[in-house]
Amino acid sequence: MSEAKKFLYVNRRAPYGTIYALESLEVVLIGAAFDQDVSLAFIDDGVFQIAKGQDTKSLGVKNFSPTYRALGDYGVTKLYVEKESLAERGLTEDDLMPIIYEDENDNFAEKPSLIFVDRAEMAKMMSEQDIVLSF
Amino acid sequence: MSEAKKFLYVNRRAPYGTIYALESLEVVLIGAAFDQDVSLAFIDDGVFQIAKGQDTKSLGVKNFSPTYRALGDYGVTKLYVEKESLAERGLTEDDLMPIIYEDENDNFAEKPSLIFVDRAEMAKMMSEQDIVLSF
Amino acid sequence: MPTLHMVNKSPFERNALQSCLAHALDGDGVLLFEDGVYGAIKGSSVSGDVEGKGGVKIYVLGADLGARGIESGRLIEGITVVDYPGFVDLVTSHDRSQSWL
Amino acid sequence: MPTLHMVNKSPFERNALQSCLAHALDGDGVLLFEDGVYGAIKGSSVSGDVEGKGGVKIYVLGADLGARGIESGRLIEGITVVDYPGFVDLVTSHDRSQSWL
Amino acid sequence: MKLSILVNEGPYTHQAADSAYQFTKAALEKGNEIFRVFFYNDGVNNGTRLTVPPQDDRNIQKNWSELAEQYKLDLVVCIAAAQRRGILDEGEAKRHGKGEGAANIAPGFRISGLGQLIEAGIEADRLVVFGD
Amino acid sequence: MKLSILVNEGPYTHQAADSAYQFTKAALEKGNEIFRVFFYNDGVNNGTRLTVPPQDDRNIQKNWSELAEQYKLDLVVCIAAAQRRGILDEGEAKRHGKGEGAANIAPGFRISGLGQLIEAGIEADRLVVFGD
């Protein structure tokens, strides 16, 4: 392999109602081993994937939300969240899980992985990718 | 079996993009043999199912639209179409296939199967059913 | 002759809830479940549609709220939370169910 | 660095086209195919969104139009009809494709 | 009360398959009778015995098979929908030359025609549809 | 140009499966190289040899298998997604005790890991995604 490519995973769907959020996350985890430049975008209903307080006990399905918090350990540290998508859904930043990573280039300081952007910034970030994966 | 039940098939989806329209139609055909009181509702994108001029040759899939025109031969003669759904989609009644049946109680006179109703009439018709099937 | 309308789609992604509410009659019930529970959150861009639908009783499935991290304090006023046995009761106590797929 | 946006959902049922148009940049292309071709019809409740998106070039797949009985006279002005080889050309002539699923 | 259930989506991909199961189970536990569960569209994929879900996840097919055993449920997979999607019983597998052992229908499920769905609507007091 | 294709939906239910096939075929006929077609989510169901579509309809699995043979295509089915949905090759069928002859993977398809999708993105000039 030559240079790292910029991989973007676009998440536009709510969790649990369909499997797409979970199976997208499984690709992210595997992809992390390939040393590419990885970003995740949460837009539209995708912002619900990282809502805090998810508890699937009564549903009888697996709660995979803790995995988002572990992404930093896999070197996946850029999770872009669209502000307009939150607002339309009656959500604020406080309704999301805190997701952080330890920056190995900065004495393992804890830093936030969630990057809150507006729609125009999200569109620009998307336009700078090599590969855009949607599920 | 005692009395006939009122069966309603609700069609809310466009044809070809998904199989639901086709597989719903297959249920209607089989169901016609059971001597129940059958109606079909075309609302939202379901109105696209009966658009005229469908030609699937370049797509390589089966054109099942002629089957709607044959429903009268199976005794399925009440196809309710919602006017508001047509208008929102830039369609008029002229954009739909003519679908008729021969009324055996009226000297086999040809009569229209399409019944154009507004949203309130559609809602009332729905509320008078025994069984509502959606695909 | 009330109907139980069942909506399992996010109102932000699809038109199912909107179409359901446009066809529900006074005395009908609407059950929000699966991704449909997002329609029960107050202060969203669609909550006005739900609040404005007087005459129709709105229910929401608790298990689906919990999975999605939605606390009861965030629900639109007047919505009733049910569990699966309550879901069954809703089906049997209405004259028919209609799924908005 | 133009992007080819691919939309295969009906704009009356889902929010994919709307979200796509809100994120497409000047110089980008949007291909409507499968049920997405309904977004190309003029005089609908969503056609204004498409017409109002200047700076973005809209394409539509002819095979999907034909299957759905949509004649070219009913398309919004300025939309280009392509076939499958044309679809391939669109992918290779843009820097990336993004599917709005 | 006597209920029939229609399942239009496959396991794991759409929650409809889970919701249908949870609803059916709750209805039975409350003493209702389930006349039939009919699997149509991608719903037929609930009836394959070949799934191997992750060990920390639910096994949807097994849940249905066990519920069927416990309550003598009639789980019917539509034959036309099943053929399109590759769900076959022994007779079908043989008839279409798919080879010995190829049948993939799960225990407790049977394959039959669409008339069984209409009958389910006629015979039950309520028909409840789960889909996408 | 070198292209990779991702197919997220199963045959017949969603047109995505047809669109992916038509696109891949057109790309090959125009002289492009297809590095890999990767089947994920319900897309893995394109790779079952057990489908018996109606005689007046297209056979999507067979179309893929023939295209693979003609152009030496690499058709890869994701193992994790396939296990959830009951698509197995011989090794998998044996390992999970599904019995002799139970493997249902179609000719020209192979089962492998998700890394193959990432590699498909890295190695190709463009990745095109077809889904619901």
Image (tube, coloured by chain):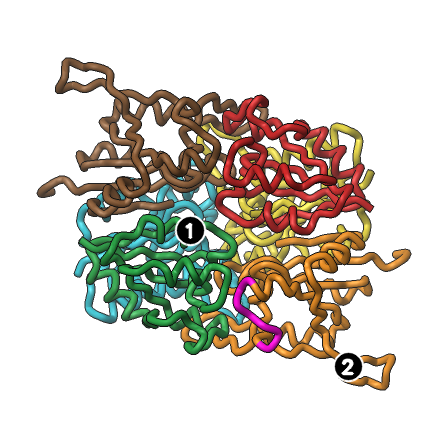
Chain colours: A orange, B brown, C green, D red, E cyan, F yellow
Q: Residues within 10 Å of mark 2 (few under 14, many from 20)?
A: some
Q: Which residue is mark 1?
A: C16
Q: Residue most toward the right?
A: A2
**The N terminus of chain F lies in quadrant:** top right
Location of residue B74 (image quadrant): top left
Residue pictured at 45% horizontal, 30% vertical? B91
Q: Is residue E36 visible?
A: no
Chain at tag 2: A
Residue pictured at 59% horizontal, 70% vertical? A50
Chain at tag 1: C
Residue pictured at 41% horizontal, 43% vertical? E82
The reply to whether dot 1 and dot 2 touch (C-beta < 8 Å) is no
Observer-nearest of C81 and F119: C81
Q: Which residues are magenta?
A: A88-94
Q: Is residue B133 left or right of residue F106?
A: left
Q: Residues within 10 Å of mark 1 (few under 14, many from 20)?
A: many
- Residue C85 percent coordinates (x, y): 28, 70
Observer-nearest of B75 and F17: B75
Q: Which residue is mark 2?
A: A102
